[in-house]
Amino acid sequence: MQALVLTAPNDFRVKEVPDPKPGPFEVLCRVERVGICGTDVHMIHGDYPMWPAFYPFTPGHEWSGQIVELGAGAEEFGWAVGDRVVGSSHAPCSFCANCIRGRYNLCLSYNNPKLHSHYGHTKQGSYAEYVVHSIRSVFKIPGGLSYDEAAVADPASIALHCANRGQVSDGHTVGVIGAGPVGILAAEAARTLGASRVVFAARGARLGVVESLGFEVVDTNVDDPAGAFRDVVGRGADVVLDAAGTPQSIPMALGMLAAGGRCATVGIPTSDVTASLSQLVLNELELVGSRAVTGEMAAVLDFIADGRVRAGKMITHRFPLADFGTALDVADRRTDGALKVLIDMSLS
Ligand SMILES: [Zn+2]
Ligand SMILES: [Zn+2]
């Protein structure tokens, strides 16, 4: 099959590799669409010490496709050749103390490749004609949902997990930092969970994008962005969802919170963060991390199918696998207002 193969940071090409084979409780899927994730961009640039786990490596984890072969045992769990599915990146061990408690995103077997797969990070991913996934980490696409929209389900599930970590509920005022796909999808998730008001703290070209999607925006291109946010929102946000995860965004998020508020951050900071924490104590603020998902995929597929999460609005560009280099550049530089750039395997 044809696959994207990364042999060192920034050194990749599309080439012929052997077809993968499904093992027990795995399925082989033909890939239809793959979204380029911000994590892929960082991984390919060599920004993360832990990912990819080895070279040569095929990244990619936001995919939709169809089952073409079942490994032993998959049929017992109701899987069939022809099922349309999306992938979720973590396939946990299911036996450790954290898995048993349902927090399988924190599986204690993460670093043991015999027990745990993190597709596109520690196991071969989906920038390829075919991908093997555990049946723990594929989900059926609801009828009527396109492969395009389904390919956005993975970042949408991560955004919903962030909103859940922030404990967004009825009547909350929610601030969102980061107007890329995960931030926008987190804002959609917050509305779905009952937030009465969702206000973006954003700047630059993407400010207009979130405004056109019907969200309130505060321009943070000022000396005191948290103050600008509070001028608009009043007492501050009950919950801030931080999809940026930068040394600037986390202190800003804390400054945007109302007393008793909670910030959930999903962007992975690639450098240290300095923040004054006196208000964390005096206002009983909470700062929580949000990693991957703990079972949000099924719900988010329903939210996408009924239009509450507008996944299709994220898709701005598509390229064949052969043009991966161009696609990566468009995603990285946000060329022409790029949000979600898809690799469309039906193009050649
Ligand atoms: Zn992703
Ligand atoms: Zn585990």
Image (tube, rainbow, N blue to C red):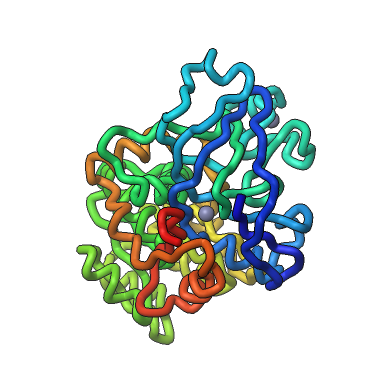
Q: Is residue 234 above or below residue 122?
A: below
Q: Is residue 96 above or below residue 262?
A: above
> In x, y percent, where is residue 92?
65, 33
Q: Is residue 71 visible?
A: yes
Q: Residue at x 29, y 63 (%)?
A: 199
Which residue occupies 24% across, 56% down? 197
Number of numbered callouts drawn = 0
Residue 98 visible to the viewer:
no
The extreme bottom residue here reads: 223
Q: Position of residue 329 (x, y in %)?
A: 52, 76
- Where residue 48 sits: x, y (%)? 70, 63
x then y, percent, for residue 337: 35, 76
Residue in view at x 69 percent, y 29 percent: 93
Task: Using the image, determine if residue 225 lies above or below residue 112.
Answer: below
In the displayed structure, does residue 134 sit left or right of residue 260?
Answer: right
Question: Split into 4 quadrants, where in the image is the C terminus?
Answer: bottom left
Q: Quadrant of residue 119?
A: top right
Q: Quadrant of residue 308?
A: top left
Give whichever of 220, 159 is nearer the camera: 159
Query: For this rendering, which residue is in front, 289 or 301?
Result: 301
Left or right placement of residue 14 versus residue 221 in this view: right
Q: Nearer the viewer, residue 179 or 4?
A: 4
Q: Residue at x 39, y 64 (%)?
A: 318
